Amino acid sequence: MESSAAIATGAPQPAEIIARAHAMKAILAERSLEARRQRRIADATIADMQRAGFFRVLQPKRWGGYEMDLLTFYEVELALAQGDMSTGWIYGVSGGHPWFMALLDDRAAQEVWGRNSGVLICSSLMPAGTAVPVPGGHRLSGRWKYASCCEHCEWALLGAVVEANGDVPPEGRIFLVPRTQYESIDSWRVSGLQATGSWDIVVEDVLVPTYRSQGMLDNFRLKGPGQALNTSSLYRVPFGQIFVRGISTALLDYGRTRVTRAGGSAAENPFVQLACAETAAALDEMKSTLHRNFKNLHAYAGCGETPPLAERLQYKFQSTEVTERCTQLAARIFKATGASGLFEQLPFGGVLADIMAARAHISNQFEHVGSSWGAVMFGRENKDF
């Protein structure tokens, strides 16, 4: 392991990591417009995030990580998003993948981090590919969309359906593939979250060994061979709760800035004041709810218990609903701040577009999760994984 023990020994405290993220907000805001134009996060930004240790927050200590809790991860994500939405987004994705790696067979982690514990991983987890069982693993093929930050990553986690084999039914699995075995295609020309660089990934008949894949149902059940070595309770916290997009507070920050620059008449307008007050109250409520849920999940994991299914679905619903509520709040603030938000120098329109793009992501489709939660309330089968 590349000086992993030394890195873990010198791990910062959570408060220091969060402070580093807040200290980066100004430079991220400065780089935001150019990042949109380039349709990718700057190399300098990724390097800054690496030096700050952000990608190690959920990484196992055995591999140079800090094994901090989800609240720390969430606070870092939120702070980065206040500087630049796309940076917060890619951190919420790639920054969460070390958690997944902790569940895989340790041979997978050795391949990824054995020479460089700072290697990053991208993903596209929708089962857009097909996998055929063969001795020792699966042969994987397919084309995946929305692989955020893929140009900065050396590995990819890709979802696929394993074909039925005799009496064995089809199965959804996640496969870990090195960059040398896939092609990334620049297909990302969009109106929101432009800087995430969410390109397509293409794999053509690649052999993926068994130890580099995991059943999607196993993920839901929080079972994986890596847990025998990565014993922290962090790796028993439900997977879906990690990918909360920290995009909320930025919209209020931009809204207040726009109103201030518009002059006293706008700042004294009771409709503008009410919009800002209601937004602030809603954001505070959502943040408090997420903090409570994370603490409860960690408490269950620390006791070696699994939260009841209905409670787990409740937390997931409250997590996925954040972006829908932020979309509504952002639209209201945008209307209240007037035409100034249309200019690139006052990029609130860009913030609104970013939030709407985030809302469209599959992980933020709260309707399906809400339906599953409601079904469980009535004693019906859960269909959400």
Image (spheres, grey):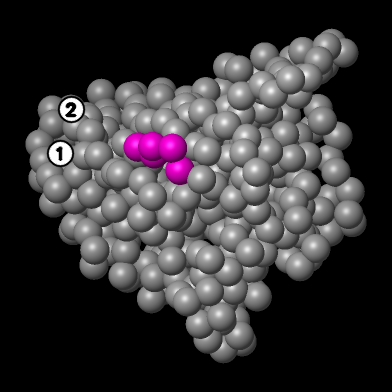
**Residue 262: assigned label:** 1
Q: In which quarter of the image is the C terminus?
A: top right
Q: Quadrant of the N terminus?
A: bottom right
* Residue 331 among magenta residues: no
Location of residue 253 with respect to 155 vertically, above or below: above
Label 2 is placed on what type of residue?
Gly
Q: Quadrant of residue 60?
A: bottom right
**Is 153 situated left or right of 98 in this image?**
left
Which region shows up in magenta? 202-206
Q: What is the residue that sits farthest to the front in this orientation? A: 135
- Where residue 229 appears, as percent x and y from the top left, is 76, 68
- SS assignment for the magenta stretch, majority: strand
Picture mark count? 2
* Residue 204 among magenta residues: yes
- The answer to whether mark 1 and mark 2 are in CB contact below 8 A is yes
Give SS at disc 2: helix
Q: Quadrant of residue 146?
A: top left
> Toward the viewer: 362 or 121?
121
**Residue 338: assigned label:** 2
**Is 305 situated left or right of 96 in this image?**
right
